[in-house]
Amino acid sequence: MIQMGSQSEADVGLRRGIVDGAMVSPPQSFLLVKDGFRELVGAEDYTKLGIKLISGGIAARRSYAAKNREVVVRTIKATMEGVKLMSTQETLSKKILSKYTRLTQPELLDRLYKFAVDAFSAFSEFSRDPTIPKEAIGSMARLMGEFGIVDRVAVASTSTEAFYDNSYVEEIKQSGFLKELWK
């Protein structure tokens, strides 16, 4: 395994034959498949296998989050508003996806939009409740240790709860924001 950099570099590495495989996410994976490459494992495969992973999220240094709690709470609220918009306004969502991914092909935009909506409905608890599942963090930490990305001993001796903080989400839930958002 070699570090290629961003998904763009991994794409170039595949196309030039420098590497035989790479981890890429949509829409990059869709473009590669369209150009004749094969997807070996996709997000739906993890779901079918019952593997819970988090592929993206909101992260901050613990010290920053503690000093700027309101910023963190507002960021989570804004993200949830974006999730709702995505799931309820397809045309606007595709326009936004096109702008930021620079995709213009309708079939790829349709596929990317469906992927995004399916990704959130696959983790239906997140689509309306952004609470971090302990088992997802635990399996990710364990895998990172097994692959040598982080110290295996440190991961094994650290409580899973040390890797995330759901208190921000709990505060949002207590405020009634999520219930109001999804009315």
Image (cartoon, helix red, strand yellow):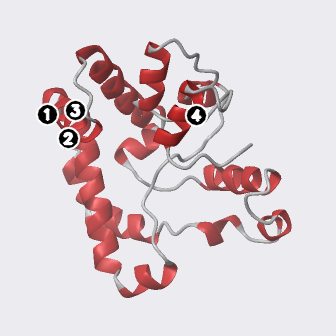
Q: Nearer the viewer, mark 4 or mark 1?
A: 4
Residues at marks 4 and 1 touching, judged by CB atoms closer than 8 Å: no
Counting from the top left corner in percent of width and height, residue 64 is at 42, 82
Residue picked out by circle 1? 92
Task: Determine the secondary structure under disc 2.
Answer: helix
CA neighbours of label 4 inside 10 A, class few (<14), some (14 to 19), many (20+): some
Residue picked out by circle 4? 13
Task: Determine the secondary structure under disc 1.
Answer: helix
Identify the residue shown where x is 14% and y is 27%.
Answer: 91
Residue in the foreground of this view, choosing between 148 and 77? 148
Question: Alpha carbon of mark 4 to alpha carbon of mark 1: how far?
Answer: 34 Å
Q: Relative to residue 132, is residue 3 drawn left or right?
A: right
Which residue lies most toward the right here?
Answer: 153
Task: Determine the secondary structure under disc 3.
Answer: helix
CA neighbours of label 3 inside 10 A, class few (<14), some (14 to 19), many (20+): some
Pick whichever of labels 3 and 2 is earlier in the sequence: 2
Question: Alpha carbon of mark 3 to alpha carbon of mark 1: how far?
Answer: 10 Å
Question: Alpha carbon of mark 2 to alpha carbon of mark 4: how far?
Answer: 35 Å
Counting from the top left corner in percent of width and height, residue 22 is at 62, 34
Q: Which of the image's four quarters has the C terminus? A: top left
Q: Which of the image's four quarters has the N terminus? A: top right
Q: Residue type at mark 4?
A: Gly
Pick whichever of labels 4 and 1 is earlier in the sequence: 4
Pick whichever of labels 3 and 4 is earlier in the sequence: 4
